[in-house]
């Protein structure tokens, strides 16, 4: 049973436009959410995170939105650039019950392609 | 370059072999992790170490045996694996257990024949 789901395996966007990547979760104990980016032949790299006490976190071109009632988060990239083409993973964790934040539950990933 | 180095990058082994994966981090972090990524499946946590002590074993079969001699090094010893264990094994480290900002290595691609 997947607790973190990214239902879109791939997304194609034109350079300069907005990319929106979506993620749903089922475990209400999750209170910390992250996005990682992965290029081929490299390990995932941390991109941005959000705590459940917030509904938005921004870092340059990247913004993550959290809707706790819908158990949904999204990553917006504006404007999208060809160098953003990668696999994007949503991840979640929780501190409840002594679980460490480093114990991440990942989604399957979404392949983003940004066309020049 | 993330500061986390994994060797070997590729490994092919038979089901009766014994091999080890090595991970080294140069970031001064105190927590280290093994994650597994099988084909078409999400990354899956295997083990967590904090200050050399194992804090998490995510129901991993005993044919996978981790070892953490110090906070900078992490090993995954492999013995009598099955073909379904073929996957990308990713090592990661973090400052401590209170952050989800993990620094991953490039992974070791394992093929079990």
Image (cartoon, rainbow, N blue to C red):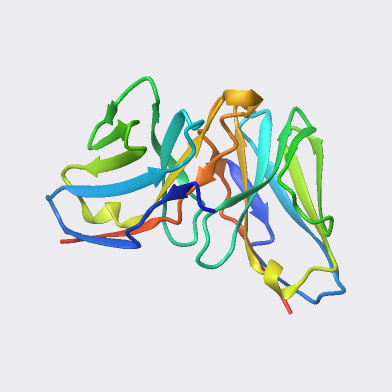
Q: Name the spot of residue A23 as percent of width and height, x first.
A: 36, 46
Q: Name the spot of residue B62 as percent of width and height, x first.
A: 84, 55
Residue at screen point 85% across, 68% down = B80
Left/right placement of residue B9 relative to residue A13 reads right
Residue at screen point 32% across, 59% down = A8
Q: Of B30 and B55, which appears nearest the observer?
A: B55
Q: Is residue B27 visible?
A: yes
Residue B40, relative to residue B48: is it above or below? below
Residue at screen point 48% across, 38% down = A92
Q: Residue furthest bottom?
A: B113
Left/right placement of residue B74 relative to residue A61 reads right
Q: Of B77 and A67, which appears nearest the observer?
A: A67
Quadrant of res B98 = top right
Quadrant where the C terminus of chain A is found in the figure: bottom left
Left/right placement of residue B16 relative to residue A77 reads right
Q: Name the spot of residue B64 as percent of width and height, x first.
A: 80, 56
Residue A47, relative to residue B110: is it above or below? above
Residue A31, relative to residue A76: is it above or below? above
Count of labels in the image: 0
Q: Of A107 and B30, which appears nearest the observer?
A: A107
Quadrant of res B55 = top right
Q: Name the spot of residue A40 as percent of width and height, x first.
A: 44, 61
Q: Is residue B2 visible?
A: no
Left/right placement of residue A55 relative to residue A32 reads left
């Amino acid at each position: 049973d997947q607790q973190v789901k990214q239902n879109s395996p791939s997304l194609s966007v034109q350079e300069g436009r907005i990319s929106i990547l979506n993620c749903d979760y089922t475990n209400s104990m999750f209170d910390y959410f992250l996005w990682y980016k992965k290029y081929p032949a490299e390990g995932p790299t941390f991109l941005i995170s959000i705590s459940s006490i917030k509904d938005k976190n921004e870092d340059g071109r990247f913004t993550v939105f959290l809707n706790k009632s819908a158990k949904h988060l999204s990553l917006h990239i504006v404007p999208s650039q060809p160098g953003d083409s990668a696999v994007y993973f949503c991840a979640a964790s929780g501190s409840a019950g002594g679980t460490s934040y480093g114990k991440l539950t990942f989604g399957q990933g979404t392949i983003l392609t940004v066309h020049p | 370059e993330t500061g986390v180095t994994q060797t070997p990058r590729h490994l092919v082994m038979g089901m009766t072999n014994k091999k080890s994966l090595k991970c080294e981090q140069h970031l001064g972090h105190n927590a280290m992790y093994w994650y597994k990524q099988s084909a078409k499946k999400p990354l899956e946590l295997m083990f967590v170490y904090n200050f050399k002590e194992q804090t998490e074993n995510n129901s991993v079969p005993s044919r996978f045996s981790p070892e953490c001699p110090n906070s900078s090094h992490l090993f995954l010893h492999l013995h009598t694996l099955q073909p379904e264990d073929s996957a990308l094994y990713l090592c990661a480290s973090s400052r401590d257990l209170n952050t989800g900002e993990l620094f991953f290595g490039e992974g070791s691609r394992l093929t079990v024949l």
